[in-house]
Amino acid sequence: MHKIWNYIIVALVLVSCKPNQTAIVTSKKEAQKKKIYTPYTTKNNTEVATTTANSTPATTPKKVKTITVVREPEGISETKPKKTPLILDQNDEDIVVTSDDTPYLTEQLINNAMDYLGSPYRGGGTSRNGFDCSGLMFTTFKTFDIILPRSSHEMARIGRVLDRNEYRRGDLIFFRTNGRRTINHVGMITEVSSDEIKFVHSSTQLGVVVSSTKEPYYQRTFAQVNRVIE
């Protein structure tokens, strides 16, 4: 009996010493409950556009490529001409995509990536059956005819590298998780606060989830944030 009480005491001590960690979001239902994912609506689009219009404009990049998002009126069905994908070359430093509909496009990119929550990790994967980290970003942007480079290392060379006070939803966030200087992991920012960044990505252990820079692993391996959509 004395031994049993000793085991119970040890177990209670171990539980009480366990460090607090930011909860990892692994499903759309859980993301909606935590209010970090909302199915896109016209009302949301209006609110986002108003917020962006009142914000401080970002610094103009050295070079600009332009893409326009076209939305057809509801109830109208027409034969659409085939779109030419916009290919972003990893050698084109400082090039970003500008759009008259940036708030709408950014929110749609986030919602598209969040729609894959719960999908498993798969090296080289680019579908709901499995993604690697760059595969998730590649597939998300490709849905909107924007073709990113295929690896996280190459993705880190496009767009504009941001200062901490510029980070916002939809930016790409990069990490060095292999103990080297080479960037090898990427995700998309879903939420920014003064001391935390939340991002959706495909992790090797959990698949597509929302994680936080408050987690020691990502705090330690953080590299940079790039903006592809201005």
Image: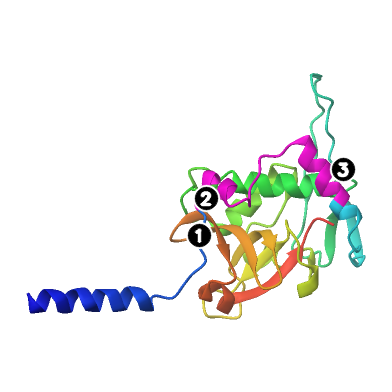
Proximity of marks 3 and 2: CB atoms separated by less than 8 Å: no
Q: Check disc 1 and give the amino acid type.
A: Ile
Residue at screen point 83% across, 28% down: 72
Q: In the rendered image, is residue 157 in sight?
A: no
Work out how far the residue at label 3 is from the one at label 1, CA to CA, in angstroms. 35 Å
Q: Quadrant of residue 41?
A: top right
* Magenta segment includes 40: yes
Q: CA distance from mark 3 to mark 2?
A: 28 Å
Image point 37% across, 79% down: which residue? Answer: 17
Q: Nearer the viewer, mark 3 or mark 1?
A: 1
Q: Quadrant of the C terminus?
A: bottom right
Residue at point 65% right, 75% down? Answer: 223
Q: Which residue is mark 2?
A: 125
Q: Is residue 13 shown left or right of residue 172?
A: left
Which residues fall within the magenta stretch? 26-50
Query: Magenta stretch containing residue 192, yes or no?
Result: no
Q: Earlier in the sequence, mark 3 or mark 1?
A: 1
Q: Secondary structure at mark 3?
A: loop
> Label 3 is placed on what type of residue?
Thr
Which mark identifies residue 68?
A: 3
Number of callouts: 3
Where, quadrant-wise, is the N terminus in this rendering? Answer: bottom left
Q: Are marks 2 and 1 in contact (CB under 8 Å)?
A: no
The residue sitting at the left extreme is: 1
Per the image, label 1 sits on a secondary structure element best described as loop
